[in-house]
Structure formats: structure tokens, C-alpha cells
Image: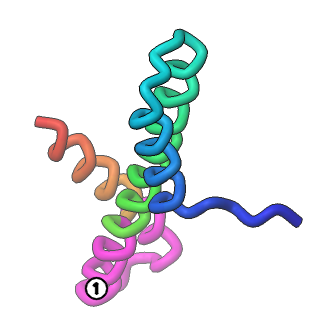
Amino acid sequence: MMKKRTDAQKLRQTAELIESGDRSPAMIAVLAKSLREIADRREADLRDEFAMAALQGLLAHASGEDPRLSPELAYELADAMLEARKK
């Protein structure tokens, strides 16, 4: 089984590719794809972190609501936090 590279490893590899001086369209496409993958994973990780924090608050202050609704609401709040960061 192949081991997934960590973001740090991927960033180091991307930096090495940039430092190589290769500015061909193919290399630029590889670099852009690599950076997009890192950004996408980081956003997903941040969304989960926001949702966990929201879920803790929702459960700590629940007053008789159905707790099964909390995870969905937590992700709605996480999405709203991500949108607010873009402003």
C-alpha cells in the first residue's frame, strides 16, 4: 500500500520543483495541481475543526433539542465561518 504524502512533504516537493527553474507549461500545471490539492485538504481540515468547535458549543448549551440535529447544524455553522473568513 502506498503511503500518502503529508502536506509538508508535498510543499517541500513543490518548492523543489519551483527551484528547479523549469517553467514549461507542463511543470506549471503540475505545480498548480499540487497547490490546489494542499489548499483543498486544508480547507476540509479547517471545516472539520470549525464543526467540532460548533458541535461542542451546541451540545454544551442544548436545552431539549434533538441531539441528532446538532452535527448538521455544526457543519452549517462551519460553512458560515469559512465564508466569513473570505470577506
Is residue 19 depicted above or below 10 in this figure?
above
Which is nearer the eye, 50 or 9? Answer: 9
Q: Residue 18, position in %: x, y?
A: 42, 33
| Amino acid bearing label 1 | Ser
Q: Position of residue 8 (x, y in %)?
A: 45, 61
Q: What stretch is highlighted in magenta?
A: 51-73
Question: Considering only vertical position in the picture, is 11 above or below 2?
Answer: above
Q: Which residue is drawn at 60% across and 15% down?
A: 26
Observer-nearest of 19 and 69: 19
Q: How many labels does the image show?
A: 1
Place of residue 23 in the rendered image (x, y in percent of width and height, measured from the top left): 45, 16
Q: Which residue is drawn at 52% across and 52% down?
A: 10
Q: Helix or strand or loop: what does disc 1 sit on?
A: loop
Q: Is residue 39 in view from this perspective? A: yes
Quarter residue 87 falls in:
top left
52 vs 32, left or right, is left
Q: Residue furthest right?
A: 1
